[in-house]
Amino acid sequence: MFDSLAEKLQTTLGEVRQRGSLTESDVDAAMREIRLALLEADVNFKVVRQFTSELKERCLQAEVIGQLNPGHQVVKIVGEQLTELMGGPPTGASASLSFSPRPPTVILMAGLQGSGKTTATAKLARYLREEHSSSVAVAACDVYRPAAVDQLIKVGAQAGADVYEQGTDRDPVDIAKWALERARSDGKDVLILDTSGRLHVDEQLMDELVRIRDAVKPHNVLLVVDAMTGQDAVNVAESFAAAVQFDGVVMSKLDGDARGGAALSVKAVTGKPILFASTGEKLDQFERFHPDRMSQRILGMGDVMSLIEKAEAHIDEDDALALERKLRRNEFGLDDFLDQLKMIRKMGPLTSLLGMIPGFGAQQLKNMKVDERELDRIQAIILSMTPEERRRPELIKGSRRLRIARGSGTNVQQVNKLVKQFGQMRKVMRQVGRGKMPDIGALMRNAR
């Protein structure tokens, strides 16, 4: 979502870094480019004006003018300002859910129709069950949208949550009160209420939300905002803030190709933090929103912490130890390589993972043209081999390569390339296992 903004900011700050020293006119020029980049990203113009004004003031107070190599200081200041714009550092007191000492904790989900509210409800239920070991129930209080109840039953079950529903004939306020009583009797830790949305903000929607809120007294009111709607999302957030005083934002569709203005504006306009981000269609593509990490990614500094967390979530410790033993004994085969490939794919799109590595800025990723289909081809080639061939790739010669190519829908050249590159990788692993530093340059030349 932030690709265009990231590319422009990284280009501007790259030019700042290259200067031996900065003048005030250099700072003004950089602020002008940053202002244009934010406006093109659909950030609220009032937010942009205040952001660049404070940014320039901080740069001047830091006395970067006339200093040698001040570029890194400017980048640091921009990163800190971006973090503040999106909600501040992780120590912020309002950057998490409030849990009741006497369960169940009640969470009220609000938002417009089409914002992804029902899916976000199921994703949040799964997140709380997985991350907090909570027993979660979700209640279907959307009685107006066709098939809304059926949708929640389906995704709620996939999330491992109990679904409380009474069809579409009862008043949503009555359903909410009934669901709360049932959650108490069932001993649930958390109850999430999926309320009805509308195609636009209206008095009936707000009145119903207020009545549900007053009836169940939720500990958290979360507004689901569609990141693809740009500045209109901020207008919606302002309207909900005036009516129901929500506590935080769930930003849906953050993996889309919109410009990202909503995510950069909503905290500054409403004063409410973004608590969670939905980064894909699957239920596990839902995570805590970290303003500092997002700021680092926008500026091309990577996001090592998120990368580590993703790895920890998908790598079993026993499997990792077994893999280490195989590497030390030089027993790493194509079956093991395929397992690692599948694990990486579970962590998310390759472009997203590469963006978390420091040094992989927007321009580098754009030039790389990562093709996810190449992983499909590699998997098809390996699966077309016999178990013995996967264990001992050196057996794969002429006729075997032709058979594998036909079985995988590829050609012999692609099979040759995979076998050669895997052989080079095993050579590196063997040298590392012996405590030697491999000649990377020679290996890269040989692998071409």
Image: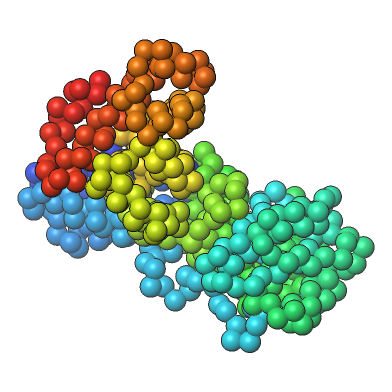
Q: Is any atom of residue 59 visible in this view?
A: yes
- Residue 248: x %, y % from top left: 56, 67
**Residue sitting at 54 percent across and 51 percent down?**
285
Residue at the right extreme of this rendering: 169
Above or below for 292 versus 335: below
Q: Is any atom of residue 29 visible in this view?
A: no
Residue 412 vs residue 56, the one in the foreground: 412
Quarter of the image with the C terminus is top left
**Residue sitting at 38 percent across and 73 percent down?**
91
Question: Does residue 433 appear to the left or right of 84 in the view shown?
Answer: left
**Exactly how many numbered labels are in the figure?**
0
- Residue 58: x %, y % from top left: 25, 61
- Residue 273: x %, y % from top left: 50, 65
Residue 205 vs residue 186, the one in the foreground: 186
- Residue 379: x %, y % from top left: 47, 31
Question: Does residue 192 appear to the left or right of 98 in the view shown?
Answer: right
Q: Quadrant of residue 40?
A: top left
**Residue sitting at 40 percent across and 17 percent down?**
401
Above or below for 384 versus 21: above
Residue at the front extreme of this rendering: 388
Colour mapping used in the image: rainbow
Above or below for 33 versus 244: above
Question: Does residue 359 appear to the left or right of 117 in the view shown?
Answer: left
**Residue sitting at 15 percent across and 45 percent down?**
434
Above or below for 385 versus 263: above
